[in-house]
Image (cartoon, grey):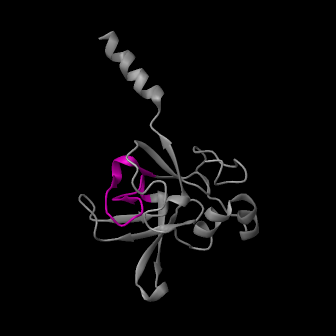
Amino acid sequence: MEEKKKGDFYSHSDTGKVNKTEAEWKDILSKDVFNIAREKGTEWAFTGKYWNSKDKGTYYCAACGNPLFVSDAKFESSCGWPSFFEPITKASVIYAPDNSHGMHRTEVMCGRCKAHLGHVFDDGPPPTGLRYCINSVILDFEKAKEADQHYKEKEKGKE
């Protein structure tokens, strides 16, 4: 997480909208995160750290900390980027038409800070039929808490 940002400036529990100037974003974000988030760049397929991850947990916006996706909604799409069939909530992401590069696509952005995340396509699995194709660079991942697992084990021992 530290490698993506110049400073730890957000909290996962802070849900207010984030409005910063491009200069402020450039000062806060690493070059790679800034390129994806603010300049609508993309990483090479099959190179991101989460494209093939099977860890359980939650994916957050690397720019602002907004919860975006849970691992239970992640699936193998063979496209080379992390793919999800739905966001964590409807408000987690926002959409915009993207007609760049001679294609007609739907851009997916963070619902909190409007960082570019990737694109959504209608060739995903049930139950939504959607494939959110997201850049690993713009994601921070937090594994499911070990404390939760220990708590559940303790509760089972009390039965």
Is 61 displayed left or right of 34 in the figure? left
**Residue 151: percent from the left, percent from the top?**
42, 21
Of residue 106 and residue 52, the one placed in the foreground of this image is: 52
- Residue 7, compared with residue 123, is above or below; it is above
Does the magenta segment cover residue 84?
yes
**Residue 88: percent from the left, percent from the top?**
42, 52
Residue 106 found in image quarter: bottom left
**Residue 42: percent from the left, percent from the top?**
52, 70
Does the magenta segment cover residue 157?
no
State the count of labels: 0
Quadrant of the rendering where the C terminus is positioned: top left
**Residue 157: percent from the left, percent from the top?**
33, 12
Is 40 displayed left or right of 119 in the figure? right
- Residue 108, compared with residue 9, is above or below; it is below
Is 100 displayed left or right of 122 in the figure? right
Q: Residue furthest left?
A: 126
- Residue visible at 65% across and 51% down in the picture: 3
- Residue visible at 40% across and 26% down in the picture: 149
- Residue visible at 58% across and 45% down in the picture: 12
Of residue 89 and residue 99, the one placed in the foreground of this image is: 99
Q: Residue furthest bottom?
A: 102
Give the magenta part as a residue range: 69-90
Q: Residue furthest front?
A: 47
